[in-house]
Image (cartoon, rainbow, N blue to C red):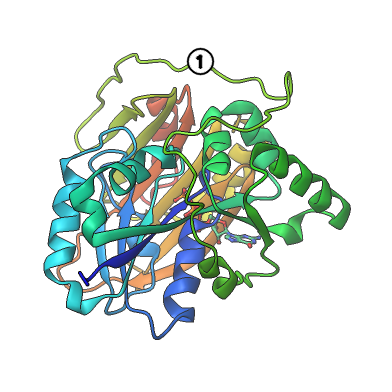
Amino acid sequence: MKETREVSILTGFLGAGKTTLLNAIISGKAKTRFAIVENEIGEESIDAELLIKGDDNIVELNNGCLCCTLNDNLYDILNQLWLRKSSWDHLVIEATGIADPANIARPFLTNESVQESFHLKRVICVVDAELIEDQLKETEVAIQQIAFSEVILLNKSEKVSVAYLKELQAILKTLNPFAEILVALENDFKIDALFNRERFSNFYSNPKPFLTPKGMFNLMPAETAAAPKFGLGNSHRKHQHSDIETILLRYTEDMDIEAIQHRMMVFLLTQSIGVYRIKGILFNKNYENRVILQTVGKGMSVSTGHPWEEGDKRESKIVIIGKRLSIYGFDRMFRSCLENK
Ligand SMILES: Nc1nc2c(ncn2[C@@H]2O[C@H](COP(=O)(O)OP(=O)(O)OP(=O)(O)O)[C@@H](O)[C@H]2O)c(=O)[nH]1
């Protein structure tokens, strides 16, 4: 029998907890050797810096969202991974937070040569229990992600009441009655249960959401306007099939870590409408490690990242994802947090 490798696709809206789950998978299923494809919207990798480093084959794919540029890149990566298949057992593809997983799954469901070697076992959707209702109202892709998955992992459940959690499960069931819904409690991701579930054999490759309650979701039309370019090294991009855009800012000067936390707190409370996600790797020469700044909705976290090694390019990189973003405004805000500005 021909050798094959199993594949899981990890989907879920921006900030739901995909990378956090991936870290738990990598460290929790010690006997399985994972190959990981990390797809990011911006052209700069931030998530790879947030992953636990190990012997795993981690491939970063940051020159486009896999779901809209599908894509010689994925075929190249599958070929490369196949050549070194003796070093891994299971492939996990982490989609971007705004990807339609059906598009990523398509080659595994329709391309015979891919199917000969790679077996798509499941699509796992991580859901932010606190924010998903708003996300469902604002973006169609949040519905597509839930509708296409075999397993829905209701994450950040400690942030909502038990009664609301039940209500939420009923809403998710209307979007996808076939999926198994697991509730992650206090970072217990139920990894074995996640990996028990397999694809339904009769599931077609481009589903519409089931029984979407009429009038419940106000879906935004997609825009296709070209994004303006800004400055050296900074960029402003639009996802090809939605009005969600990305800004990347870089600074080589020392970032004042206290100042940026304070500034971000005020920003999140007063000005953050339309900003879904901010991820920053911050540099300050007085810190031996990278400082990781993240926001999801109005929540913010600051943590310690990997140490700076010799040869690393020492700079702060900040990615902002949302709608109708002003690169000038964000640049001004982050510049005001630089030391010796
Ligand atoms: N309170 C709480 N925070 C969590 C939980 N899981 C993840 N987070 C936090 O949520 C933020 C986003 O988590 P990520 O794992 O980076 O989310 P993601 O889905 O990979 O985000 P994108 O790459 O932007 O799509 C981080 O600050 C995490 O620490 C949880 O169960 N509870």
Q: Quadrant of residue 206?
A: top left
Return the residue found at the far front: 1
Whether residue 280 can be seen here: yes
Q: Can you give x and y, in whole percent of width and height, for residue 221 in the image? A: 51, 15
The residue at 18%/78% (across/down) is 86
- Crowd tier of the residue under label 1, counting other residues whose Cα lies within 10 Å: few below 14, some 14–19, many 20 or above: few
Q: Can you give x and y, in whole percent of width and height, for residue 43 in the image? A: 25, 42
Residue 163 placement, left or right of 76? right
Ligand 1 closer than 8 Å to label 1 CB:
no
The residue at 55%/48% (across/down) is 295
Q: Residue 281 versus residue 30: which sits nearer the camera?
A: 30
Secondary element type, mark 1 = loop
Q: Quadrant of the N terminus?
A: bottom left
Please name the amino acid that badge 1 sits on: Pro
Q: Quadrant of the C terminus?
A: top left
Q: Can you give x and y, in whole percent of width and height, for residue 64 in the image? A: 26, 38
Return the residue found at the far bottom: 31
| Displayed-image quarter of ligand 1 | bottom right
Q: Residue 205 versus residue 85: which sits nearer the camera?
A: 205
The residue at 34%/46% (across/down) is 109
Residue 248 placement, left or right of 133? left
Q: Is residue 341 above or below residue 92?
A: above
Q: Can you give x and y, in whole percent of width and height, for residue 93 in the image? A: 35, 56
Q: Is residue 137 above or below residue 124?
A: above
Q: Residue 261 versus residue 122: which sits nearer the camera?
A: 122
Return the residue found at the far right: 163
- Residue bearing mark 1: 221
Whether residue 341 can be seen here: no
